[in-house]
Image (cartoon, helix red, strand yellow):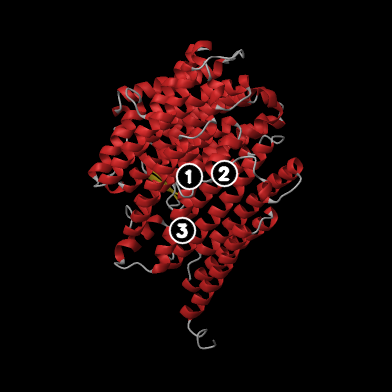
Amino acid sequence: MNTLIYTSVLGFTTMLMEVLNLRKFIVPLAVIGLAVIFGLNLQDWNQPSTHFNDMLGVSNFSVAFSGLALFITMIILVMAGEYYTNDENHISDYVTILIFITAGAMMMMSFNNLVMMFLGIETLSIALYALAGSKRFDTRSNEAGFKYFLMGSFASAILLFGIALVYGSVHSFHLSLISSFISENSTLPPMFITGVILIGFAMLFKVSAAPFHFWAPDVYEGAPALITAFMSTLVKIAGFAALYRLVTIGFNNGTPQTDQMLYVVAILTLLTGNLSALAQDNFKRLMAYSGISHAGYMLLIVLSAKSHVSSTLFYYSAAYAVAGLAAFSVALPVFKSTGSELLSAFNGLGKKNPVMAAGLTMAMIGMAGIPPFAGFFGKFYLFTKAFESGLFYIVLLAVINSMIGVYYYFKVIMAMYGKQPDETQIENPLSYQLVMWVCTALSLIWGIVPSLLTDLLL
Amino acid sequence: MTNLLQTPEATQNWYLLLSTVLFSIGVIGVLFRRNALIILMCVELMLNAVNLLLVSISAYSGNVDGQVFVFFIMVVAAAEVAVGLALMVSIYRSIGSIDINVLNKLKW
């Protein structure tokens, strides 16, 4: 809980520094501050506690995921310093909003009460609407922000109606009371089931699972590339942490109704994500569909929630995050130098800048789930756990889908090595290189020694 | 009608019905209207239907949590509208319309 307070204070500090004319120091201070908070966060390890009348519960689960959230934000802020060099007047706005999004994500990872979950989701979403539309003079960015706002607020209203219906039957917002309500009643009232399903719809919308995924490609494509990187990593992980926490603590590892719903949604998500990704020629759109297919894999973890798979979810999230961040740390300078966000922007990168091409290749291999990178073991543990929980057919489908996935990840690699380069030179600033090396190294280390992360949570 | 209103449970069901109807009107508005401002108002209608439901459940069950949650929802709705109207202004400046059919730069 202290982590949450420190993060919010850091957000206010960066906002105040703009007023105090310390604009140059905002990004360094925010990065150092997040690193310090990352350390302080670890103090709560193995010390479960509840705060604010059991509204927030600190557990190893929340500490691990908050640490991951802080790490991702740190990486994004390192890149933000470089990304916003032409827009220094607003740097404090961007940094502050990014930090507050992290605070919202941390609320989503440690809630014990539906009120807290709602507040976390809204803190994260409302800030993201603003960030997605933050390129004010770019029509596409405006459109992305606006579409995200309309659909996101619609989903929030549905989430609220679900919460209200659950409250109507349980007369409480506490996850533990909802859980005991489920175990005490052999036949659940229809009002409760409707509420749970509506909450499920809204959460599936937030993690962009099919058939609620339609906003994701548009928003990812239109939003500024750095924000796309942020959305495809932290926001997705926070959504899944919240969904997992909701299912395990609140809904007794899933009622039959929710399991059926998740089963169908997982199949749809896997197929839609992977098959639509095949046809994409825009890198951000490709990453959006790749994110949808990863959401499908992560739904398998939520489906097998009975067999204590929080470490699998954490490992998969961490592997996915570092691969995504490494990919964007190469893509951002390429977008900037070529002025294009299509896959053709990467043509001949292997000849022009072999180091960047190697970094992106490793990121793509990691995302596709090929050893020795962490992405492979993430998928491996995920399939094993899902198989052990008796999800045979869907695991088979997921394996086939991850083979389809290899094709579109290799499309990027083929563009880099197989196509002829054009004249434009790619400038690669130091901070992007740093991020690329750190993320690739982590992906490799976690891939070679998976027990570093998998033994963390039980 | 009067008989139905005599027991607390029956009255509560009427409130449930009323807020479901209001919520559905909001959903239909969001799905079928093309003007962004009206869609925003329909979302607000949905949120207020939820508020009504929470308050009525809270009053009949004697549990205050629901009424407190309503305040949170109001605050969040205000923040949401602030961001939403700002986005709407910027989209009006760049496109000159807030009809959502005009939002087709990004293909579906």
Name the mark on residue B108: 2
Provide residue A346's location: percent of width, then percent of height. Answer: 53, 21
Query: With A192 as the anchor, is A82 left or right in this view?
Result: right
Q: CA distance from mark 2 to mark 1?
A: 15 Å
Q: Residue furthest bottom?
A: B3
| Residue at the spot 34% in from the left edge and 26% down from the top edge | A370
Q: Closer to the camera: disc 3 or disc 2?
A: 2
Q: Given the image, what chain letter belongs to the residue carrying mark 3?
A: A
Q: Closer to the camera: disc 2 or disc 1?
A: 2
Q: CA distance from mark 3 to mark 2?
A: 25 Å
Rendered position, A291 above or below A173: above
Q: Residues within 10 Å of mark 3 (few under 14, many from 20)?
A: many
**Which of the pair A222/A61 is nearer the observer?**
A222
Provide residue B1's location: percent of width, then percent of height. Answer: 54, 86
Rendered position, A425 above or below A187: above
Mark 3 = which residue?
A198
Q: Of the residues shown, which amino acid type is indicated by label 2?
A: Trp
Q: Of the residues shown, which amino acid type is indicated by label 1?
A: Ser
Q: Of the residues shown, which amino acid type is indicated by label 3?
A: Leu
**Which of the pair B92/A172 is nearer the observer?**
B92
Mark 1 = which residue?
A208
Q: CA distance from mark 1 to mark 3?
A: 15 Å
Residue A446 appears in the picture as rendered: yes
The reply to whether discs 2 and 1 touch (Cβ–Cβ < 8 Å) is no
Rendered position, A385 above or below B23: above
Q: Residues within 10 Å of mark 2 (few under 14, many from 20)?
A: few
- Count of numbered tags: 3
Question: Disc 3 on helix, strand or loop?
Answer: helix
**Which of the pair B74/A207 is nearer the observer?**
A207
Q: Given the image, what chain letter belongs to the residue carrying mark 2?
A: B
Query: With A160 as the anchor, is A62 left or right in this view?
Result: left
